[in-house]
Image (tube, grey):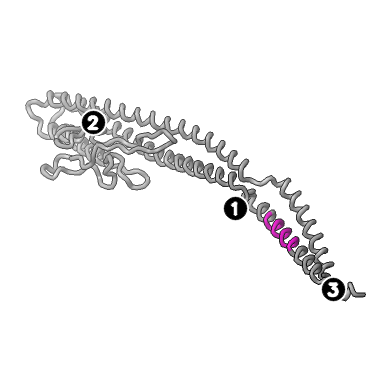
């Protein structure tokens, strides 16, 4: 009986030490990580809620990445549209200058040469790329330059993109366009490259180079087309500005909600350091007591009882 009792005491003391060591180790790990829940078994309901909250936080992080990417892309588009407007403004000034009977063929030839340069600049702007190397004005065809010489008539610039408009998910229920197809921006008819701003500048240069009998009428037509192109660019640029403002506003909304989520995650999963330190002190003391008890049981033997 004495041997059995001693064995039981030995096991009980050993189990007590093991339980205390586990508790101390867990508290130390909690204090190191700052997390109250180290595994689902610690709090099944809290762990499930924490998983849901972290998933929601991950989605809002993705929304912010989408906003950052869209903002960069739209800023680049806005800059390209502004530069394209500057090109057309210069072409407009040159067209008005050229519509003067005091100019001779050489004078008009110089103006035509500058118009050709403006034409090349406008094509380059039509093939502008964002920070990741994707073409801004190709619609969904963002990996290929949208504007290139027409295969049937190399003098004309054809549109190789499509009419697609990419969208970015910026919030749980909000999406926003992050680009504009080039055929709309530069008024190019995909089926007829003789229409659009590139064709206008090309015809304008040719008119100045050849000085036809209809020179003044042709320059007047070119001026009307340039003004129409400027109005169109200004309208699209205004839409881009509205989108950029919407992105900024959505970013603020997302940030506020993310802060709320983070606070809730902290309430559910973060450790109360003061309480944990107090508990660690209690468990450490309990471990010391258990170890002392174990040592006393270990020193017991049948001979102690026989004496």
Asked if one can make out residue 106 in the rendered structure from this viewpoint, the answer is: no
Please state the extent of the stretch shown in magenta in the rendering: 15-26
Classify mark 1: residues with Cα within 10 Å, few (<14), some (14-19) or many (20+): few
Image coordinates for residue 268, horizontal then vertical, percent: 61, 42
Tell whether label 2 touches label 3 (CB within 8 Å).
no
Q: Which residue is labeled 2 in the image?
A: 91
Location of residue 233 with respect to 157 vertically, above or below? above
Marks 3 and 2, the one that precedes in the sequence: 2
Q: Earlier in the sequence, mark 1 or mark 2?
A: 1
Judged by depth in the image, the label closer to the viewer, 3 or 2, is: 3
Q: Secondary structure at mark 3?
A: loop
Membership of 240 in magenta stretch: no
Q: Residue at x 70, y 47 (%)?
A: 273
- Which residue is the extreme one toward the front? 1
Mark 1 lies on a secondary structure that is loop
Q: Is residue 268 above or below residue 23?
A: above
**Residue 301: numbered disc:** 3
At 36% from the left and 31% from the top, the residue drawn is 240
Q: Residue furthest left?
A: 213
- Give the side of residue 41 with respect to residue 286, left or right: left
Q: Which mark is residue 39?
A: 1
């Amino acid at each position: 009986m004495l041997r059995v009792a001693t064995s039981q005491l030995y096991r009980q003391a050993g189990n007590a030490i093991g339980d205390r060591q586990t508790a101390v180790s867990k508290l130390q790990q909690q204090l190191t990580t700052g997390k109250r829940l180290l595994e689902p078994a610690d709090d099944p309901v809290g762990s499930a809620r924490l998983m849901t909250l972290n998933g929601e936080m991950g989605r809002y992080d993705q929304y912010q990445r989408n906003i950052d990417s869209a903002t960069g892309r739209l800023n680049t588009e806005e800059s390209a549209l502004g530069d394209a407007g500057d090109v057309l403004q210069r072409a407009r000034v040159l067209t008005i200058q050229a519509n003067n009977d005091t100019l001779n063929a050489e004078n008009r030839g110089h103006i035509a040469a500058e118009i050709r340069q403006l034409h090349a600049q406008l094509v380059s702007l039509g093939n502008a790329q964002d920070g990741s190397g994707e073409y801004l004005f190709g619609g969904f065809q963002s990996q290929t330059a949208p504007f290139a010489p027409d295969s049937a008539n190399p003098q004309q610039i054809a549109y190789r993109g499509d009419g697609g408009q990419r969208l970015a998910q910026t919030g749980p229920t909000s999406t926003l366009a992050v680009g504009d197809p080039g055929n709309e921006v530069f008024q190019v008819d995909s089926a007829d490259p003789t229409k659009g701003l590139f064709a206008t500048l090309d015809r304008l240069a040719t008119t100045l180079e050849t000085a036809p009998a209809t020179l003044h009428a042709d320059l007047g037509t070119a001026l009307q087309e340039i003004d129409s192109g400027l109005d169109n660019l200004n309208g699209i640029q205004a839409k881009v500005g509205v989108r950029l403002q919407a992105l900024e506003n959505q970013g603020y909304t997302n940030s506020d909600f993310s802060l709320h989520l983070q606070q809730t995650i902290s309430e559910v999963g973060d450790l109360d350091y003061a309480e944990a330190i107090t508990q660690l002190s209690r468990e450490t003391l309990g471990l010391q007591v258990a170890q002392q008890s174990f040592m006393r049981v270990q020193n017991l033997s049948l001979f102690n009882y026989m004496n």
